[in-house]
Amino acid sequence: MNIFHKIISWLLTPIFIFIFFITLCIFHVFQVISLNLFGYKGHKKSVDYMVFWLMQALRVLGARLPNMKQPNLPTDRPIIVVANHQSIYDVPAILWTFRKYHPKFVSKKELEYGTPAISYNLRHGGSVLIDRKDRKQSLTAMNQFSKYIAKNNYAGCIFPEGTRSKDGKMLDFKPAGMLMMFKSMKENPPIVVPVVIDNFWKIQRYYFKPIPFGINFQLKVLEPIDMKIWLEEGNSSTSLIAETEKRIKEALINKA
């Protein structure tokens, strides 16, 4: 960053952080009220509004928001959204893009408490929290989560790298989680949707000291893969994971 860019970034970062946390606190209250008064539908609506405003908050930093146009996918089939992972903002971007399909996340148990709105949504919104140190708990939770997604024809969202990339370079996939999802959803095979996330890593590039001004965030939904057709053509679940990983990597390398 040049000196002017750095000064602007330092001036705007605390304003953004304030707006970010105020938004979380306000919508934490809204989530509690909407869930208790209106059940799942009310709670989901409050989460949709929350992620919309979290994304809009990035404009304070002079950011260009990604194209978050909803993809045209069937609503009578379960969906698995597979994305590379770069930052905390990957989640609201995916939540907003796939809001029509009731996106639920595979997340680490450490996020169960401690963060306003986000932790509450993870506990009550249908996502799954796994303990990465407890393999038995993780597999059991993933099995139950996958059946829940298949039963309701929702979108299960997963970051197979297991952790975020700190420099934008995609890490190798850890296939265990996806394999468990595929196995648990064999009665109602999902549509797998690869998603490419780019430049999101820059928001945490300097660990918020500061957040760079003018980031051009990018999100691209790639061609979906129907697992049912994939298997009928003689392919395996493992090769489906490899193909999904390949498409995301290629899209990152060949980005415009």
Image: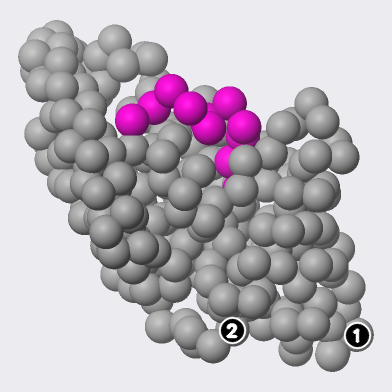
Residue hosting label 2: 77
What quarter of the picture does the N terminus occupy? top left
Residue at 18% over, 37% down: 26
Q: Which amino acid does label 1 sit on?
A: Gly
Name the side, left or right, on which 10 lies relative to 33.
left
Instruction: Report if residue 228 is visible in the image.
Output: yes
Name the side, left or right, on which 37 lies relative to 185.
left
How many residues crowd around disc 1 within 10 Å: few (fewer than 14), some, or many (20 or more)? few
Q: What residue type is labelled 2?
A: Arg
Instruction: Report if residue 48 is visible in the image.
Output: no
For label 2, the SS is loop
Residue at 61% over, 34% down: 108
Residue 174 inside the magenta-drawn segment = no
Q: In which quarter of the image is residue 185?
A: bottom right
Q: Where is residue 177 in the image (x, y as percent from the top left)?
A: 76, 51
What quarter of the picture does the C terminus occupy? bottom left
For label 1, the SS is loop
Residue 111 inside the magenta-drawn segment = yes
Q: Where is residue 14 in the image (x, y as percent from the top left)?
A: 15, 16
Of tags 2 and 1, the one toward the viewer is 2
Residue hosting label 1: 234
Q: In which quarter of the image is residue 216?
A: top left
How many residues crowd around disc 2 within 10 Å: few (fewer than 14), some, or many (20 or more)? some
Q: Nearer the viewer, residue 115 or 243?
A: 115
The magenta span reads: 106-116
Mark 2 in CB contact with mark 1 (< 8 angstroms): no
Q: Which mark is residue 142?
A: none
- Where is 152 relative to 195, above or below? below
Q: Position of residue 156 (x, y in %)?
A: 58, 62
